Image (spheres, helix red, strand yellow):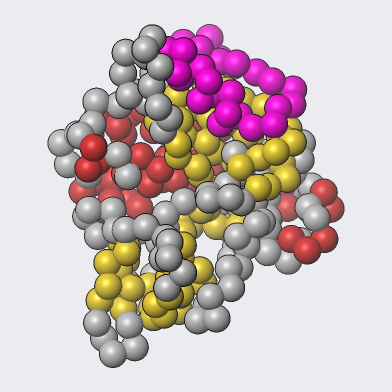
Amino acid sequence: MPSSFSFPLIRLVATESTNEVALQLARQGAEHGSVVIAREQTQGRGRGANSFASPPGGLYMSLILRPDLAAPMLPFIPLAGGLACAQAIEEQTGLAVALKWPNDLYLHHRKLGGILAQAGPLSPSSALPFVVLGIGINVNTRPETFPEELRSIATSLYAIKPVQYDLDGLLESIHSRLLAMLPALAGDAASMVNAWRQRDYLLGKEITWRDIRGGTLKGCGAGMQVDGSYLLRAPDGTLHAIMAGDVTIGLKGVEQGDHANPNL
């Protein structure tokens, strides 16, 4: 890493999950901005109970954050993380990355990466609440290393533009962008939301929302609101604000690429 990177950085050759390592460190009091990075994960984690293969070549990192934010603003952290990733990738590669609410990165209509935010119970030695933000991006991943069932729905930066990308440079850019966004969220998230909206992958697409109880709602993506929720326009024109649950592309409710990215 460049000498300008002054935050604690733990490098691992392989681990079950960078998020699990970061959660342990956070409970022990690790400082804001600390990073865990691994070349490979053997039990990478996604949202809910999903698990992901994480072959060599990807960027697998977890950031320990102790933001000075009110509880209602915490859901903006993974949204800001996605935006920081998109901006950093665009800066390094010139490729336009789209954001699928709430936590996925898309490139050329295929899944490029994803984000997992976790907060754990504090130990007596932890002075501040924390959020661990896991980021998994297919960077130098060769397409042939994806499981066969994912090759039509996943992608990597290398697959689109076959050059060797600087993982450390990408990490530092994501890290600095995200940490710069967090203080702004304490006052007004509008600037971040507006930038996120410019990359909205679901806007105008037919989507299905499934809540935690298994209920579904079908309609058209109508954009993210200033409170971080996402609008679904039902066939009768009614707008529904979604705060949680899973959003899939298509009216059949079958996710295109839900298991396509190595996540954390």
Question: Residue at position x 73%, y 32% from top?
Answer: 40
| Residue 183 location, quadrant | top left
Q: Residue furthest left?
A: 187
Query: Where 16 sits versus 94, above or below?
Result: above
Question: Residue at position x 53%, y 75% from top?
Answer: 253
Query: Where 216 sits versus 11, above or below?
Result: below
Asked whether residue 169 is in view, the answer is no
Q: Along the horizontal axis of the image, is 77 left or right of 143? A: left
Q: Along the horizontal axis of the image, is 115 left or right of 17? A: left
The quadrant of the image that shows the N terminus is top right
Query: Does 35 appear in magenta?
Result: no
Instruction: From the top left corner, tell me how far across and down residue 237 is, in percent.
Output: 26, 86
Q: Residue furthest bottom?
A: 236
123 or 53: which is nearer to us?
Answer: 123
Query: Does 9 appear in magenta?
Result: yes
Question: Residue at position x 78%, y 63% from top?
Answer: 149
Query: Where 67 sits versus 142, above or below?
Result: above
Q: Along the horizontal axis of the image, is 260 left or right of 46? A: right
| Residue 54 location, quadrant | top right
Instruction: From the top left corner, tell me how far across and down residue 62 is, in percent.
Output: 53, 30
Instruction: From the top left corner, tell me how far across and down residue 108 is, in percent.
Output: 60, 63
171 or 28: which is nearer to us?
Answer: 28
The quadrant of the image that shows the C terminus is top right
Asked whether residue 29 is in view, the answer is yes
Q: Along the horizontal axis of the image, is 4 left or right of 109? A: left
Question: Residue at position x 42%, y 54% from top?
Answer: 102
Instruction: From the top left corner, tell me how far across and down residue 75 is, in percent.
Output: 32, 44
- The region drawn magenta spans 1-29
